[in-house]
Amino acid sequence: MGRIRKTLNKKLAVGVSAQLGKQLLPPGVSGNDNERLVGLDFQFTTGRFGLRGEALTGNMPSTPATVDPEFFQAFRPGAHSSAGELLTTYRVAGAHTVYARYNQFNGDPVTIQVDAAVMKLIEQIPRQGIVTFERAARTEAGIT
């Protein structure tokens, strides 16, 4: 596993990460046990505005990060997963920040669905609305 991050100036930083290895396969399953992941990210800030993005792609994971292996029901050897996130922030005053976030996870090993983000208005305050994006389509797996 490795990660490189470079700050290009005081406002912009970019990074790349990679993980190479092997993963466990469920009992009785044979096939590709490679674990190869590549990720890219960036972060930009100027004044009160911030923007951050991440993308990750690679082999679908077979287990969550736990001590005792518990295999994902939709895992298939050699299958791929990819994910991305974009976050924008604006500091209104002091510690008060308004943000919008978009997440997407393709090839979810729990449900094998595309986990697309949906927009949800969470609160309406006079003359101010706060909009956030939250992940959807994981309720079938009991993950909220």
Image (cartoon, helix red, strand yellow):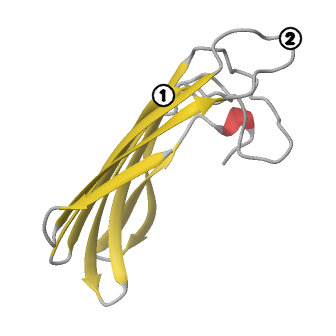
Q: Position of residue 9 (x, y in %)?
A: 13, 68
SS at badge 1? strand
Q: Position of residue 121 (x, y in %)?
A: 42, 57
- Residue situated in front as seen by the camera: 107 or 66: 66
Q: Is residue 82 visible?
A: no
Q: Identify the residue at image location x=48%, y=28%.
A: 58
Q: Is residue 56 above or below residue 51?
A: above
Q: Is residue 65 above or below residue 24?
A: below
- Residue situated in front as seen by the camera: 42 or 109: 42
Q: Is residue 96 above or below residue 120?
A: below
Q: Identify the residue at image location x=15%, y=78%.
A: 47
Q: Is residue 12 visible?
A: yes
Q: Which mark is residue 28?
A: 2
- Residue situated in front as seen by the camera: 85 or 75: 75
- Residue situated in front as seen by the camera: 39 or 132: 39
Residue at far bottom of view: 94
Position of 39 with respect to 7 (left or right) is right
Instruction: Assess whether mark 1 and mark 2 are in contact (beta carbons under 8 angstroms).
Output: no
Check disc 1: other Cα within 10 Å, few if <14, some if 14-19, many if 20+.
Answer: many
Residue 72 found in image quarter: top right
SS at badge 2? loop
Q: Position of residue 4 (x, y in %)?
A: 34, 53
| Residue beneath disc 1 | 58
Position of 113 with respect to 18 (left or right) is right
Q: Identify the residue at image location x=31%, y=57%.
A: 5
The three-letter amino acid code for the residue at tag 2 is Gly
Q: Is residue 84 above or below residue 13?
A: above
Residue 112 found in image quarter: top right
Q: Answer with mark 2 or mark 1, whichever residue precedes in sequence.
A: 2
Position of 133 with respect to 67 (left or right) is left
The three-letter amino acid code for the residue at tag 1 is Gly
